């Protein structure tokens, strides 16, 4: 319901220029609440609600269209709502930024900047500047900024933030940057190149420095665009280039050519000036010239060149033309030629159009056009296709008229124009040469018969052959459409001479040749038909006259000529009338032949003849309506080069079938249909015998008659079958597709479609009774039914293909600068024709009648036929019908249920066909329809259906089960319309406004409902709700009965359990019976059943969760001195012994907040915490106090046998080496402990202890899942329960930490991280203190690193609220930084990165005032390394430089080396200096653990290069590039004197420093 309603609103609001803010105001909060409820609900992950996959994008589109109409106060209200989520270390930061991006209004922000974007601009950018290490929410913020920049051009000062933003943009490409053979490039970010391009373009112009930064960016990227440099980054680079130019030209169009509507209009000084455009084109030009020859980027380069050439042709076109000339002269680089051809055809309109800036451009068009003909190469189809595209593109824009002899008649021509006129003299030679090359391809495309038993008629057409046909025909058609009559005659003569006397196979080469001939008749039908049709008719008549009826197969010449005939008659019917008698006579002879290829070809002739006589279509598609046959002394064709069409004066010459054409079509239809229907009638009455071939022939001609004249075959008129009771009229409407009265091609004064239905119905019954193995005729009947149901003038497949072709052509030929006003006429005419065809297709939507029902019954027989090919076709047509006619599937449900029953009269094939009909296609099954009655009928029938164990049945049954599990959306049970909505709807009848006798509002078509009607409607809705609720209960009860019966096959039992789990929903509790089945299935022998039950248990426990009471918690001084991080008003949230609950009173105090983000920045309007335990649901309940559902779960858990078996199953190993912590099992245990408290734990203590002691991987994994569920589930336990829990659990944890294994350390890390997530640290201080008990105990490298790992997981979840704990940990770990084991040192570095991750510096101060900061770390550690500044002894340096590895130095040699050093330095080297340095480097933010922080100035206080490059430190040879790799992703703040002073000791000779630039990355500054 939400999805459809949102889609309707999207359609109403899409035209923003029709409604401004004075017309409409929309509230933002209902949209937000709906978005939050649907897309951020925890119920989705539990499976309690299933939403449509498309609803996310639909709702985002709705908000996008609505936000322009939000009230002025919306921005401030949104900020108050979402600021509490802004914690950079928490995932809620991404949620907040996502909401800001989607909801914040910017379209009309210019009216009141102080109440809109100025409220959040500096604030959000301040967060971004502080968090520079690729935060996950960065794309959302950049999207918001891009939208703000576009809607408020020139209003926002971006200069302060440009260095930061451009640096982020450069990082998003993930470019490979190497230093000392080590890649120090960035890992790449999730920024969208389209968003980045949008922001850049929107900030250009005026006094903005954006162009300077953009030019520098492209200079740094230029080498990566080179065709020799190909990598995974190339796609994003070329995409960015393409998007940038696209947004730029759209902005120029918006500012200079688009009609103004409401919204912001930038001041003239903030718009793009001519110099801005020139500078932009010059900055992009070098990279696009590189990209145009790239194998991956030439398509994007073509789009970019089209934009740039439109803006500044004089800067782009000369180089492109020169490159194409050069490529044409080079035969050894085919890719360079194809890429150059594509680039030039992309700028075709710019090159053709006369430009004052580049007047010589037109002089290159024809020489290049003539020069590319060698590209049509039989041996290189890729090159041939791009050449065809090139020629057709230019042919569409250039009139093919030889006016070289009329130059002197036009003295106003410039020198360039005179040259172009002289070049047109080669048009004739061009057309002749073009056709010669096409003929060569055709003659080399013949299908060769290589095996005697395989006919060429059965050969399949390859994709390459299809491309040849389409490419050649479209190019030739484009040339002829633009050609003068003289040149047309040349082409006609050339083709006619080539065709005359030829015999080609009709599948490939004959079809291509026929396509060329069709181009001639399509462009000038009268002349083309006169030149070709008599010749072809004469040949066919001569062959037919000799007799063909008794031949089994037609000869090759006749097949070729029939193919030619079927193509050239595809012209407006008025041109076909002079030949119609000969065609009619010919058809009368041909229909008597019944060979396979004869049916196909004769049917095509019949279909195309009827379609020509009955269809409305444009006669021509020229770029100039006046044509090109005018007097050249007064007409100058150069004026039509690249000419645009005028949409208000297209002067389309429509062909509309006249009386004579309709009369001829009627006669032909009556003749063919009459003969065939009579024949079939006699056949079904056993009065006449037909062979299979003759029967197939009759069916084919009936089908072709419908496809040819269906536009004038009216639908039958009968009483409508009511498929769905509704309060509104559901009858279908039809479009007008013919001026005046629509002709009706009847048969014997009866409805032709209905006559055919009746004959086909009888034929089907006859065939199934007498010749059930005649699959060809049965498939033919399905095809006829398909045409009768859906065909009304044009096949949907054909229309879709033409629409795609039109869109591609329009995109290639459009002028983005001038917009839709400058589209060429041929495209506009084609669009008009497509619109007419879409109306014809719309007329296929009809009301469902008894005849439709008869067709459905026949199709059901075909869809369940014995033969698979018949079933497939029947299922295809019937499936399409069920989608086409709303609710018609309900008529089939009872029959499908009957077919699923186990009955000896129902065959295996019928059963399988019924299953496939229920399955449907693409996830659209009958079981997923939003109809409870249908589900109630089909679901139990499918579960019980168990006919056979054949693989084909198992396959479709499994697919059906998967479809229900993955595609069944939550179906509405209780539907309600709020009274407010009903009252608003009633006002539609009150607000009737008129102005100057024109209606300003639309009146509802029906009268205003009375109070009684409203009450009746309410009653009807309530009755439907009760009915739906009862049906749902019946479905669940029936499924439970089937599962409890013990009669189901194991596969069907699995399906039943899965469907029962899918039916679990948020608004209806599952009955105790269903809960019992799921609980008992936790110890089922089948692993699939157990997994389904485990996943469903979390949902069932959630259903039975009792609501917990919350109270408001007052925050003192919460609006004073607001800044991110630690403040006085959030001190009570910090982890400290003073805040630990030690008594029941403290436990029940309102001082515990479980969500980590609360308090970091702003507080919510109403801060709520959980009330004391005496106000919460009682956990210590008797059995009588439990509901029936809870009782089933509790009794199962109290049974020791069940528990033992459950734990055995949960601790089984499933996939060795691939098993991991299962969140579904964790959720189950969490729900159990949450709902039943300490009573369940009593039974689980001993098993849990055994699992923790067991060294088996699977046992410890099971323990970790239970342990995390226990700690998270005890959130609302009473003080006594919690004390008892931790008094038992703390010793278990201490023992456990010594028992972890290599295989399970990851599971235990996830366990403690999960247990700590969304829990107040003071409420789980027992766990944190256990983990803090001497993390390093020198019990071995693995145990030390594992204790650090689990501590890190728990600590990281608490983020900013454990500053004291981080200080303690920092002090404890400092002495161990030079730990002898590498894995411990690596883990130490990772933990230290977490410790210092809170050192985030905002403009208002540090965000981690109570946490350790890097400055203190370096102040403490660096003095220990000062002595290492001393230069080493040259002898030692040379020795180590020449030694291969540090391992060559033995103990004696090491002591000799140390003796030459300064005593203090030697001591440091011996003790810890080198190891400590390595550990320091690994502790930086931006290293192993992603940190949001930028690199602070103190982070640059690194040891000098002498230390980093000490010759005796062989193990540190890779440190400089590693350091770059770590610091590269981190961001430096703007260069400051403090930074320069810090870096001065690392400067080069003479203390010279590199010139710092804003946003420069650390490696650029650190390394001399």
Image (tube, rainbow, N blue to C red):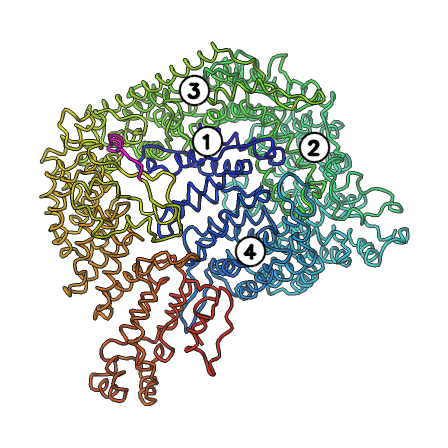
Badge 2 or badge 4: first in the primary sequence: 4
- In this rendering, position of residue 1195 left or right of residue 27: left
Specify the quadrant of the image occupied by residue 576.
top right
For the residues bearing labels 3 and 2, Cβ distance under 8 angstroms = no
Comparing 995 with 666, the one in front is: 995
> In the rendered image, which residue does mark 2 sit on?
542
* In this rendering, position of residue 779 left or right of residue 749: left
Q: CA distance from mark 1 to mark 3?
A: 44 Å
Which residue is under mark 1? 3
> Badge 3 is on which residue?
768
Pair 4/1: label in front: 4
Q: Residues within 10 Å of mark 1 (few under 14, many from 20)?
A: some
Q: As rendered, which of 1522 and 720 lies closer to the eye? A: 1522
Q: Earlier in the sequence, mark 3 or mark 2?
A: 2
Q: Quadrant of the N terminus?
A: top left
Rendering coords of residue 1393 (x, y %): 31, 61
- What whole-number distance in Å separates the C-alpha atoms at marks 4 and 3? 78 Å
Write the residue at 59% across / 56% down: 301
Marks 4 and 1 in Cβ contact (< 8 Å) = no
- Mark 1 / mark 3, whichever is N-terminal: 1
Residue 204 marker? none
Mark 3 surroundings within 10 Å by alpha-carbon count, few (fewer than 14), some (14 through 19), many (20 or more): some
Q: Which mark is in front, 3 or 2?
A: 3
Residue 299 appears anywhere in the view: no
**Within-10-Å neighbours for mark 2: few <14, some 14–19, many 20+:** few
Secondary structure beneath dot 2 equals helix
SS state under label 3: helix
Q: Which residue is mark 4?
A: 158
Q: What secondary structure is found at the residue carrying circle 4?
A: loop
Q: Are marks 1 and 2 in contact (CB under 8 Å)?
A: no
Quadrant, the C terminus: bottom left
């Amino acid at each position: 319901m939400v999805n459809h309603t949102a889609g309707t609103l999207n359609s109403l609001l899409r035209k923003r220029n029709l409604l401004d803010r004075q017309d409409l105001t929309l509230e933002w909060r209902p949209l937000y609440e709906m978005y939050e409820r649907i897309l951020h609900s925890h119920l989705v992950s539990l499976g309690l609600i299933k939403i449509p996959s498309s609803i996310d994008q639909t709702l985002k589109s709705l908000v996008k269209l609505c936000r322009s109409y939000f009230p002025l106060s919306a921005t401030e209200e949104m900020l108050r709502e979402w600021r509490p989520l802004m914690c950079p270390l928490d995932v809620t930061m991404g949620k907040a930024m996502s909401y800001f991006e989607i909801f914040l209004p910017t379209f009309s922000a210019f009216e009141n900047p102080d109440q809109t974007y100025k409220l959040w601009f500096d604030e959000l950018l301040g967060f971004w500047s502080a968090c520079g290490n690729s935060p996950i929410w960065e794309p959302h913020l950049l999207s918001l900024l891009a939208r703000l920049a576009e809607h408020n051009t020139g209003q926002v000062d971006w200069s302060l933030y440009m260095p930061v933003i451009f640096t982020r943009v450069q990082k998003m490409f993930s470019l490979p940057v190497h230093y000392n053979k080590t890649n120090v490039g960035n890992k790449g970010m999730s920024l969208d190149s389209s968003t980045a391009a949008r922001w850049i373009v929107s900030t250009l112009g005026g006094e903005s420095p954006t162009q300077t930064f953009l030019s520098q960016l492209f200079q740094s990227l230029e080498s990566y665009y080179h065709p020799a440099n190909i990598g995974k980054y190339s796609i994003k680079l070329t995409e960015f280039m393409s998007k940038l130019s696209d947004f730029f030209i759209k902005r120029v169009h918006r500012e200079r050519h688009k009609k103004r509507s409401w919204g912001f209009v930038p001041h003239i000084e903030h718009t793009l000036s001519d110099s801005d455009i020139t500078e932009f084109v010059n900055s992009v030009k070098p990279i696009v010239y590189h990209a145009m020859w790239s194998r991956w980027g030439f398509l994007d380069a073509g789009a970019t060149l089209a934009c740039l050439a439109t803006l500044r042709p004089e800067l782009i076109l000369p180089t492109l033309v020169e490159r194409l000339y050069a490529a044409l002269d080079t035969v050894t680089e085919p890719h360079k030629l194809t890429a150059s051809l594509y680039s030039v055809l992309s700028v075709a309109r710019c090159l053709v159009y006369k430009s004052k800036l580049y007047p010589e451009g037109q002089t290159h068009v024809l020489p290049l056009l003539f020069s590319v003909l060698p590209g049509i190469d039989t041996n290189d189809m890729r090159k041939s296709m791009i050449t065809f595209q090139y020629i057709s593109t230019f042919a569409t824009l250039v009139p093919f008229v030889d006016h070289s002899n009329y130059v002197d008649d036009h003295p106003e021509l410039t020198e360039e124009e005179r040259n172009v006129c002289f070049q047109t003299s080669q048009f004739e030679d061009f057309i002749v040469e073009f056709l010669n090359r096409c003929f060569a391809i055709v003659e080399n495309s013949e299908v060769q018969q290589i095996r005697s038993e395989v006919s060429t008629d059965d050969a399949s057409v390859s994709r390459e052959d299809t491309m040849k046909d389409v490419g050649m025909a479209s190019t030739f058609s484009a040339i002829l459409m633009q050609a003068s009559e003289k040149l047309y005659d040349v082409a006609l003569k050339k083709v006619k001479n080539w065709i005359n006397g030829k015999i080609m196979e009709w599948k490939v080469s004959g079809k291509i040749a026929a396509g060329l001939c069709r181009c001639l008749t399509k462009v000038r039908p009268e002349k083309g038909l006169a030149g070709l049709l008599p010749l072809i008719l004469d040949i066919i008549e001569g062959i037919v006259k000799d007799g063909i009826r008794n031949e089994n197969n037609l000869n090759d010449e006749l097949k070729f000529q029939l193919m030619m005939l079927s193509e050239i008659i595809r012209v407006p019917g008025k041109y076909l009338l002079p030949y119609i008698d000969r065609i009619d006579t010919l058809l009368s002879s041909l229909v008597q032949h019944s060979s396979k290829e004869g049916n196909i070809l004769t049917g095509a002739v019949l279909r195309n003849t009827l379609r020509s006589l009955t269809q409305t279509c444009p006669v021509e598609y020229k770029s100039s309506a006046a044509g090109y046959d005018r007097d050249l002394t007064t007409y100058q064709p150069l004026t039509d080069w690249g000419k645009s069409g005028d949409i208000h004066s297209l002067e389309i010459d429509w062909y509309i079938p006249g009386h004579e054409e309709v009369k001829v079509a009627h006669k032909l239809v009556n003749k063919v249909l009459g003969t065939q229907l009579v024949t079939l009638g006699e056949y079904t009455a056993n009065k006449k015998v037909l062979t299979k071939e003759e029967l197939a022939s009759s069916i084919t001609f009936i089908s072709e008659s419908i496809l040819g004249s269906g536009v004038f075959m009216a639908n039958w008129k009968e009483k409508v079958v009511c498929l769905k009771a509704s309060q509104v009229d559901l009858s279908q409407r039809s479009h007008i597709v013919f001026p005046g009265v629509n002709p009706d091609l009847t048969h014997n004064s009866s409805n032709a479609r209905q006559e055919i239905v009746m004959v086909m119905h009888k034929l089907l019954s006859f065939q199934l009774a007498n010749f059930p193995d005649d699959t060809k005729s049965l498939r033919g009947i399905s095809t006829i039914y398909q045409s009768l149901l859906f065909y009304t003038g044009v096949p949907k497949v054909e229309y879709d293909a033409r629409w795609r072709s039109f869109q591609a052509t329009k995109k290639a030929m459009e002028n983005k600068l001038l917009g839709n006003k400058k589209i060429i006429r041929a495209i506009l005419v084609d669009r008009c024709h497509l619109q007419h065809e879409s109306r014809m297709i719309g007329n296929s939507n009809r009301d469902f009648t008894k005849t439709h029902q008869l067709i459905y019954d026949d199709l059901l027989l075909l869809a369940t036929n014995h033969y698979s090919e018949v079933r497939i076709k029947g299922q295809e047509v019937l499936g399409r019908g069920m989608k086409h006619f709303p609710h018609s599937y309900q008529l089939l449900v009872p029959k499908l249920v009957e077919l699923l029953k186990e009955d000896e009269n129902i065959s295996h094939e019928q059963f399988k066909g019924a299953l496939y009909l229920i399955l449907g296609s693409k996830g659209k099954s009958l079981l997923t329809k939003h109809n409870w009655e249908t589900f109630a009928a089909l679901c139990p029938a499918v579960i019980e259906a168990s006919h056979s164990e054949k693989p084909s049945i198992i396959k479709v049954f499994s697919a059906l089960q998967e479809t229900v599990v993955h595609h069944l959306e939550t179906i509405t049970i209780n539907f309600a319309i709020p009274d407010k909505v009903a009252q608003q709807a009633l006002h539609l009848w009150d607000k009737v406004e008129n102005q100057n006798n024109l209606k300003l509002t639309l009146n509802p078509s029906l009268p205003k409902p009375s109070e009684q009607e409203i009450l009746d409607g309410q009653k009807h809705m309530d009755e439907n709700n009760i009915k739906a609720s009862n049906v749902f209960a019946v479905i669940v009860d029936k499924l439970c009965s089937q599962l409890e019966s013990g009669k189901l096959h194991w596969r069907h039992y699995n399906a039943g359990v899965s469907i029962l789990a899918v039916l679990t929903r948020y608004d209806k509790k599952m009955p105790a019976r269903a809960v019992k089945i799921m609980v008992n299935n936790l110890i089922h022998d089948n692993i699939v059943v157990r997994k389904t039950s485990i996943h469903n248990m979390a949902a069932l426990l959630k259903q039975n969760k009792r609501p917990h009471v919350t109270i408001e918690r007052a925050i003192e001084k919460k609006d004073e001195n607001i800044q991110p991080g630690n403040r006085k008003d959030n001190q009570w949230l910090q982890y400290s012994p003073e805040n630990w609950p030690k008594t029941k009173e403290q436990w029940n105090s309102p001082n515990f907040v479980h969500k980590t983000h609360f308090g970091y920045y702003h507080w919510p309007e109403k801060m709520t915490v959980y009330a004391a335990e005496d106000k919460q649901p009682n956990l210590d309940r008797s059995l009588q106090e439990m509901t029936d559902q809870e009782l089933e779960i509790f009794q199962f858990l109290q049974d020791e046998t069940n528990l033992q078996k459950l734990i055995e199953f949960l601790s089984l190993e499933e996939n060795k080496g691939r098993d991991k912590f299962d969140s579904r099992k964790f959720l189950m245990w969490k729900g159990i402990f949450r709902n039943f408290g300490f009573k369940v734990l009593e039974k689980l203590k001993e098993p849990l202890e055994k699992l923790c002691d067991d060294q088996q991987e699977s046992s410890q994994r099971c323990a970790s899942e239970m342990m995390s569920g226990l700690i998270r589930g005890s959130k609302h336990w009473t003080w006594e329960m919690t004390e008892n829990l931790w008094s038992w659990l703390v010793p278990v944890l201490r023992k456990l930490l010594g028992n972890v294994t290599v295989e399970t350390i990851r599971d235990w890390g996830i366990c403690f991280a999960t247990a700590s997530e969304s829990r107040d640290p003071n409420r789980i201080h027992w766990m944190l203190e256990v983990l803090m008990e001497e993390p390093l105990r020198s019990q071995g490298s693995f145990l030390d690193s594992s204790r650090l790992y689990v501590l890190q997981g728990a600590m990281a979840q608490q983020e900013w609220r454990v500053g004291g704990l981080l200080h303690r940990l920092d002090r404890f770990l400092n002495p161990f930084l030079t730990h002898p084991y590498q894995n411990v040192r690596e883990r130490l570095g990772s933990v230290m990165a977490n410790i210092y991750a809170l050192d985030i510096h905002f403009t208002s101060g540090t965000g981690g005032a109570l946490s350790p900061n890097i400055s203190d770390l370096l102040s403490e550690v660096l003095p220990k390394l000062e002595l290492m500044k001393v230069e080493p002894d040259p002898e030692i340096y040379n020795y180590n430089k020449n030694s291969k590895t540090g391992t060559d130095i033995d103990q004696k040699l090491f002591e000799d080396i140390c003796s030459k050093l300064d005593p203090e330095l030697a001591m440091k080297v011996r003790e810890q200096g080198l190891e400590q340095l390595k550990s320091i480097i690994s502790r930086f933010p931006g290293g192993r653990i992603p940190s949001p922080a930028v690199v602070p100035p103190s982070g640059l206080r690194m040891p000098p290069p002498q230390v980093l490059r000490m010759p005796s430190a062989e193990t540190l040879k890779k440190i400089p590039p590693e350091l770059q790799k770590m610091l590269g992703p981190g961001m430096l703040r703007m260069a400051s004197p403090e930074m320069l002073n810090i870096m001065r000791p690392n400067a080069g000779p003479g203390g010279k420093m590199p010139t710092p630039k804003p946003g420069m990355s650390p490696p650029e500054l650190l390394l001399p």
